[in-house]
Image: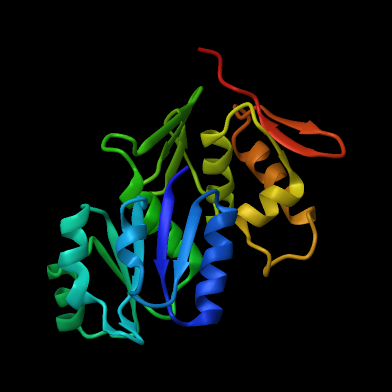
Amino acid sequence: MSSLLIIEDDLLLGEGLNRFLTNQGYQCTWLTTINDIDKHWYSADLVILDRQLPDGDSLRHLSTWLSLKALPVIVLTAKVEVEQRVEGLMSGARDYITKPFANEELLARILNQLRPIGANTLNYRSLVVDISSRSVSVGDIPITLKPKEFQLLVLLLNHQGRVFHRDELLNKVWGYQAFPTTRTVDNHILRLRQAMPCLEIETHRGVGYRLRKESS
């Protein structure tokens, strides 16, 4: 389980990010100021850093924090000018995302930063999923998936053999705010089964779904 350090003073945004990323399986620590960042920096695997904090511009301290431990840093900011984005990257940040943003985009950027070198492809029988390009194919046949279908597929592939409750899938892929019922999960599972018959997704009645682990 990767540990994320979130520094965001907007309480609504910070609480939402903390909840969303925790639901994605990350261990999150959320701070609203630069106070105490030093002692949490060592235990983090990635930092999500708001630029404008009550203490000032966080980029002024970034080089010092990175000297403690080199970490991938994604800067969140309302500053959209090219010069300001360049300044963020030149300060040591790995990535830069402007507000407002979609949680799914931030999640994709986190996955990209935490992914080990050479781990961009997932395979299951004749299925090949390229994470970086978000492309899916069965043999030589390309498969077109909607964003949530793709996210659900990757989740199942990364946890083969595990039974997921419908509520858990709903929360991990869609979050709490989007859909009121688990019927959405059922419809997306049906779509994955129809599009990729090689996926052996089992239904566990009254519980949820499991992707049968591929035989070695």
Coloration of the structure image: rainbow
Indicate left or right for 60 with 160 as reference. left
Residue 147, image x, y percentages: 53, 56
Judged from this view, the residue extending furthest toward the right is 206
Please determine whether, in this image, residue 34 is positioned above or below residue 71.
Answer: below
150 sits to left or right of 167: left
**Figure quadrant of residue 155:** top right
Asked whether residue 47 appears in the rendered view, the answer is yes
Residue, far top: 216
103 or 90, nearer to the observer: 90
Q: Percent x, y for residue 136?
A: 46, 41
Q: Which residue is drawn at 63% across and 41% down?
A: 192
Instruction: Name the residue located 29 percent from the left edge and 63 percent from the top edge.
Output: 38
Q: Quadrant of residue 6?
A: bottom left
The image quadrant that residue 117 belongs to is top left
Q: Pinpoint residue 205: horizontal percent, then vertical percent.
A: 86, 35
Q: How many marks?
A: 0
Q: Is residue 187 visible?
A: no
Which x, y percent locates residue 47?
34, 61
- Specify whether 173 is left or right of 166: left
- In the image, is residue 31 above or below residue 22? below
Query: What residue do we see at 21% from left, 52% from top?
Result: 70
Q: Nearer the viewer, residue 123 or 116?
A: 116
Q: In this view, does 206 lie above or below 59?
A: above
Q: Which residue is drawn at 58% across and 50% down?
A: 149
